[in-house]
Amino acid sequence: VGSTMHYGIVTPETMPPASPKKFWMESMGGAICFNKDSCSDKEFSVWLDLVTVIFRYTKPFIEGIGVTAQQFLGMLTAPNNANDLSQFRQLQAAYLPNQKGGPLEGEVGFYFPSCSGDAGLGNYEVNYTSNMTVRHAGGVGFRAMLQAIKAKHSQIDRMTLIGASGTAVSRVAWAPAVADMLPQTQIMVVADSAMHVLPATQAFQFFWNEVQWSPNPSGNHALAKLYDPNTNSFPTFDWRSVSAISDMLRSYGGRIKLLYIGCVHDKVIVGDRSMLSRYAKLNTSATTESSMKEIEQETWDFLKRLRSDAPAGTAFSYITEGDCHHQTRNGFEVEKNNASDPTDLGVQKFTEAFLTGNTAGPQHRWCCGRGLSQTATIGGTTA
C-alpha cells in the first residue's frame, strides 16, 4: 500500500522563449496515517491509492467519458502521452495558477498527486502488521522531482511550492531543504489549510516522537525500515521550538517567503484532529467542539508569534471566518474579512499578490477581531 510517484507537467499557453527560470510545484495527497487503525480508516486510507483519489475528485468527468478510475489513471500515466492538465481547472482538483491571466502565467509547473499517507515527508516502509505494509515514501518522490528539475535547469530564479491540507504542512517543512538544494533561488510557499500540525504542539510532538515514518532520526522506527538509505536533502521537520518557523525564515535572510491561508474553523482540520486524538490516544474523549477549540487556540497562538517574530516581508497570512478547506482548489469561495476596507481585496487577490511579488499593505489579515499588522515591501511596492 502507498502509491508510487506520479506527476504532471503543467505547461503555460506560451512557453518562455529561453530556458524557463521560474517554476512551481503543486502537491496533492494530504491525509496521513500512522498505525493499523488510522491506515484502515475509510477516509485516511483514500490517500494511500491514486485510483481512489481519482475516483473521488474526477468521478463526474470520468463517468462522462465512459472510463473507470483505473483506466483514467492509465491514460494520465501512459509513457510519452501528454495530457492537457488544464482540464483539472474545470474539475477544481488543483490550483494550477499558470493559466493566462493567472498569477504564475508563463511559468512551468509540476502537479504532484502522489499518495503515500505521509503528506510527502516520509522515507520509510512500515510493517504495521503481518499483512499491512505501507510505503510511506512520499518524501523520496518529491526529492526526486526536485533533483530532476535542478539537473535539467542550471539557473532557477524562483521556485514556488504550493500545498493544501497535509501537503501544506509538508511544503513549509520542505522549504529550507529546497532552499539548500537551490542555493541561488528564491523560495515561495503557499500553505493552504495548513493548521493540522504546528510547532511545539501536542500534535507535532506525537508525530516527531511516535510516528514510524517521522523524519526524527531518534524517533520510534521499531516497525520501519528506510525506503531509500540516502537521506540527503530531506527536510528535518524539527519544529520542537515554538519559534521554529520564524527562526527558519530569519536564517535564510529573506530567501524564503511564506503565506498561510485558511478558515479558522476548517471542518476538515477539526475532523482530522478528532480522529488523530482517537487513533493516537491523545484524547480519547475528543469531540468536534473540543477539537475546534484546540485548533483555534493553536492557530492564533502560532500566527501571533509568527507576526511578531518573523522578519518583515517574509511571512504573510489571510485567515477568514467559517469552516472552509482547500481554498485554492475550490475557487476561494469565502468573503473578504472587511468588505468596507478598500485595501482588503480578499484572500484570492491577497494570494495572487503574494505570488506575483506585488503585495502591499498589511502582511497579515485576520478575521474575528484579531487585527492587522506590518506592511509589506515586496518587488518594490511599499504601503
Image (cartoon, rainbow, N blue to C red):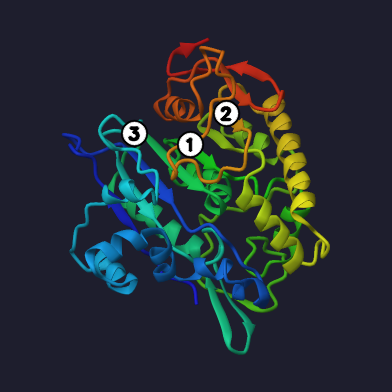
Q: CA distance from mark 3 to mark 1?
A: 20 Å
- Mark 2 closeness class: few <14, some 14–19, many ≥20 residues within 10 Å: many
* Residue picked out by circle 2: 316
Residue flagged by tag 3: what amino acid is it?
Answer: Leu
Q: Which residue occupies the foreground of this view, 165 or 189?
A: 165
Q: Which mark is residue 104?
A: 3
Q: Which mark is residue 333?
A: 1
In this rendering, is residue 101 above or below 150?
A: above
Who comes first in sequence, dot 2 or dot 1?
2
Circle 3 — which element?
Answer: loop
Q: Nearer the viewer, mark 3 or mark 1?
A: 1
Q: Position of residue 380 (x, y in %)?
A: 43, 13
Q: CA distance from mark 2 to mark 1?
A: 20 Å
Q: Is residue 382 visible?
A: yes
Q: Is residue 200 visible?
A: no
Quadrant for residue 161, please give it.
Answer: top left
Q: Position of residue 124 (x, y in %)?
A: 57, 71
Is residue 45 shown left or right of residue 157? Answer: right
Q: CA distance from mark 3 to mark 2?
A: 18 Å
Pointer 3 with pointer 1, Cβ within 8 A: no
Residue flagged by tag 2: what amino acid is it?
Answer: Phe
Q: Which residue occupies the foreground of this view, 9 or 71?
A: 71
Residue flagged by tag 1: what amino acid is it?
Answer: Glu
Who comes first in sequence, dot 3 or dot 1?
3
Q: Position of residue 366 (x, y in %)?
A: 64, 27
Circle 2 — which element?
Answer: strand
Q: Which mark is residue 324?
A: none
Q: Residue at x 74, y 62 (%)?
A: 209
Pointer 3 with pointer 2, Cβ within 8 A: no
Is residue 36 shown left or right of residue 57? Answer: right
Q: Residue at x 30, y 59 (%)?
A: 61
Is residue 242 shown left or right of residue 36? Answer: right
